Amino acid sequence: EKANEVMGDNAHVFLGANPLQFDTEHSSLYFDRCNRQIVTTHGKEVRRISLRRDRDTVKISHIGLAFVIDSFIVKFSLDHTFLALVKSHQQVDFINLETQVLLSQRCKRTNAKLLDFFWTGPDTFFFVTTNGFELYQFSSSKKSTKLLKELKMPVRWFSYSSKLLVLATGSLQSTIYAFFFKGTSIIKIPKFELDTSGPGANNKLVTKEKQVTICRLYDKVCCIHHQVSKRQLHLYQMNRESVTLSTVIDLHTEGKVVVHVVDNLLVCHNIQKKISSIFDIREEESFVAAPLPMVVEDVHIKSEEIYGNDWIYCPTNYVIVPSKGLLCEVKVNLTGVMKAFSSKRILIDFLLRRTNSKQLILGQLQALVQERSSLALVSRIFKQINAILQEYPEREDFDSTQTASSYNFQFLSSTILSPQKQEERESIRNLKRDGAVVITQSDMHKNIFLPMDNAEMDQKYFVALLVEYIRSLNHYKIEVLYFLYEIVINCLVRNNHFYQLHQFLQYHVIADSAPVAYQLLSIEKRYPPAGQLALDMLKRLNTQPSHVIEILLLRKQTLTALRLLRKTKRDTNSASEVNRFLEAASTDDEVLFYTVFKYFEERGEITQEHQSYQNIFNKKFLSADLE
């Protein structure tokens, strides 16, 4: 958020400050996407640098071996008990870091070339070869392995991300087979064909590995193909039943493209033109903001060094600069991107799908209220906000943002990723599914309604705004918290709009609740009918009789309180309660005092604690009888 404030409109995409730093004195460098770490080797030493930071500290582990490492692939197991080294295209050596025991595993097919290997669990891994893939598992003693499954097919290239393996085959390398690894089980996805059409009518282009990106957008697994001749991105959504071409994005530019995913946004870097574009597949046009060069916050990288030839672009949103020993995170400057939206409604939609955008949303709402935007527009935005709140009612009790989802893709749903349609119902349904920020009633009260409740605000508009927000909450069956009603009542009373207050209560715009009833009692002197409205409300709420009796006594309705006490049919009343009644009846009205005293006397509840009232009764009534 600080970065957003500093850069303003200068950039839409930037490399975050405080990049992860590592030693440039290394013989090899690897980005381990499964463990989210960088692995470097130098002589007999292996270093792993975790991307998972804890309070801005970087965890660096050093491991010394008895031999010089000359492998072209180095990876740790998911629990970091094994170090795997690939020295040839036929074999992987596993070193048990606890016992220092070396275990080797060769490809099953002697004519197969090992392309890469990946861990799927603490004790399971698979090889990707030119002949398919082989899934293995360590024995319980971790001294041997066994083959669990083998798939034989010619492989031209592959891509693996977050447990999803994509294999390309065919003369144009465009026939795609996909497999999801879950422990020792494998889920096969239906095969599909990538678009290979070239610039001419009969021309076909060979698909290359670098043109395909596997990612997750809005909790759906996607295969993104850069169709070079058409200057487009083809987004295929994959699930168990089918693979669907769900979105086509026009890039409008030529050249090599690298795709990153940041907060469910596609960030497309054009390496030759040195610009980055942002796309949101939920928007009707997908294109979000004008392509601009990235901005670098870190002093280690100069502006002319951006999109360097030695840069390594890693999923899902990292850039490695080997010459400087830096790993930078690609981020989106929402403050700058916001300027690209002309519609406030669409902007709020966009921001609600972004994490850490709560303050930006609240700022936009403040501006709308200050500008006295139409109630129709504000009502639509309230629907957007409360549709998400309905899905996360527990967020009302604490301030938190939606946590990032796990890496496992969800294949259970076959819902197609598509732009949000104009129909309001469909748009709201998408927001419920995609919403990343929850704006609670407390957020609205603290940041919107309280600051705006002042003399400068048009009170009629302000009350209408509050009522519209309450109506929206009721529409989504969200319990309205009392402080919203409190602001409405205070505003109406302050402006002497008692008739409107009466109407709101009568037609339950302001719902029954004990706090509302007590607030009505507090304004009884300014608006006498409020007292009876409060008592009627308490009766509807089945409030404890003792509370209502106390209120009636405070309002000097002693006989009414006595009738209610008699209806409760309690055997005995406490001395303090009897005392409270007698105190309330001690007025110039002798009939009232006589009635109350005799009621408790006949029940045998007048004791020594009430001697002062006994004396008053004797003086007023018994002495008169004696005379």
Image (tube, rainbow, N blue to C red):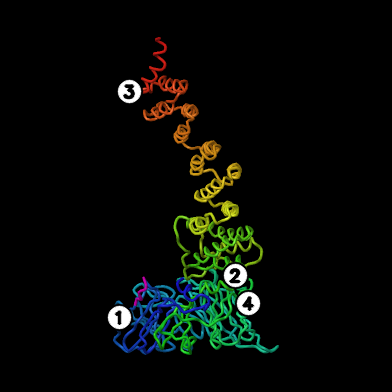
User: Which label's residue is closer to the chain start, 3 or 2?
Assistant: 2
Callout 1 crowding tier (Cα within 10 Å): few <14, some 14–19, many ≥20: few
SS assignment at label 1 = loop
Residue 56 among those drawn in magenta: yes
Q: Nearer the viewer, residue 560 or 194?
A: 560
**Residue placed most toward the observer, 103 or 451:** 451
Task: Calculate the distance from the C-alpha at mark 3 to the C-alpha at mark 2.
Answer: 79 Å
Mark 1 or 4: the one toward you: 4
Q: Which mark is residue 608?
A: 3
Q: Nearer the viewer, mark 4 or mark 2?
A: 2
Q: Comparing marks 3 and 4, which lies closer to the viewer? A: 3
Q: Quadrant of residue 273?
A: bottom right
Q: Could you tell me if residue 476 is visible in this image?
A: no
Question: Is residue 527 depicted above or below 235 in this figure?
Answer: above
Tell us which disc is closer to us: 3 or 1.
3
Task: Say which mark, if any, is on residue 100.
Answer: 1
Residue type pointed to by label 2? Arg
